[in-house]
Amino acid sequence: MKGPPIVSGDNRRVKLAASLRRPNACIEHGAFLVEGPRFLDGAGDTLPLFVLVSTEATPEAGAAGERAEASGAKVLKVEPGVFAKVSSTRTPQGVAAVFPLPAWTEEDVFRGGTVAALDGVSDPGNAGTVMRSAAAFGGGAVFLPGSAYPYGPKATRASAGANIRLPVITAGALSDLVSRHPDYIFAGTDPRGTPLSGFRPDRPVCLVVGSEARGLSRDSADAVACLLSIPMGGGVESLNAGVSASLILYHLREILGTRRLGRNKESTSEPKTFSLTRKA
């Protein structure tokens, strides 16, 4: 990080990074913003287009910038006031990176691992949580209409940067995916569904998660093969979409074994039989 820091918000890279708080700018420029040292370090082999480091960055953020520079990334120092134009957090740590938008295909997502499909999950925090859990327990994610943009700053933070590596696609209709992937069981979430403990699938699952307020859309409810519920007590009526999806994705990992992008490991769970009746 040699040379004087950038002192103007009119710098082209600063203006680009600041614009990426809007989904349309991400799509226009084919890039998205990742903020924070932990998420930058978690990018693995994916190299950012460039990194901005505040002259008042925390020691952890500064070190993350140095590691990024050592890996070959373009790293620029900026004044704190300039960094504030880029940051979308209340207490920024002082490092942000611009990554190219991934170009995943449907085949990358449906490769034998568990898939999470978000149906109208508009809250970016919930959307990010689902992506983070999908990365931990499954293999990919699908964003259906009405869901939050998967590469917005809030969704990226909630995913802990998992969207850098997680295969994510958007789709127009769940029914089309069902017809193209007959090897998958498409299961939706619904309080009236079969209790999760009774779900013993014998093949990969695409879990379709609806919004907390409205549940599954009518089209998605018609397209899924079955509905799952999480029994609750203590006067709790519902869980948010992120928590619900995480619990079910963990259950599927335990039942099906760890399957990551089609690279299957042996499962130590009990024999698997799909005995769940279809939804009414």
Image (spheres, rainbow, N blue to C red):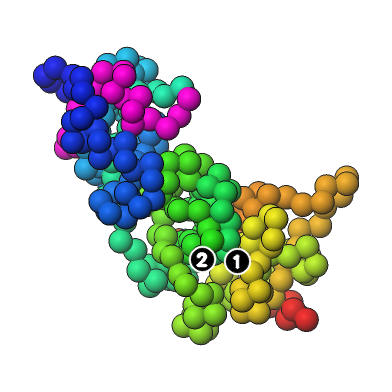
> Badge 1: how crowded within 10 Å, few (<14), some, or many (20+)?
many
Q: Are marks 2 and 1 in contact (CB under 8 Å)?
A: yes
Disc 2 marks which amino acid? Leu
**Which residue carries the number 2 mark?**
144
The residue sitting at 54% across, 75% down in the picture is 174
> Foreground residue, 277 or 3?
3
Number of the front mark, 2 or 1: 2
Find the magenta span and give its range.
68-90
Q: Would residue 133 appear left or right of 156 to someone viewing this image?
A: right
The residue sitting at 51% across, 42% down in the picture is 158
Report helix, strand or loop for mark 1.
Answer: strand
Seen in the picture, residue 266 relative to 27 is either above or below; the reply is below
Spot occupied by residue 163 in the image (x, y as percentages of width and height) = 41, 50
Spot occupied by residue 83 in the image (x, y as percentages of width and height) = 31, 25
> Foreground residue, 173 or 244?
173
**Which residue carries the number 1 mark?**
208
Residue 274 visible in image = yes
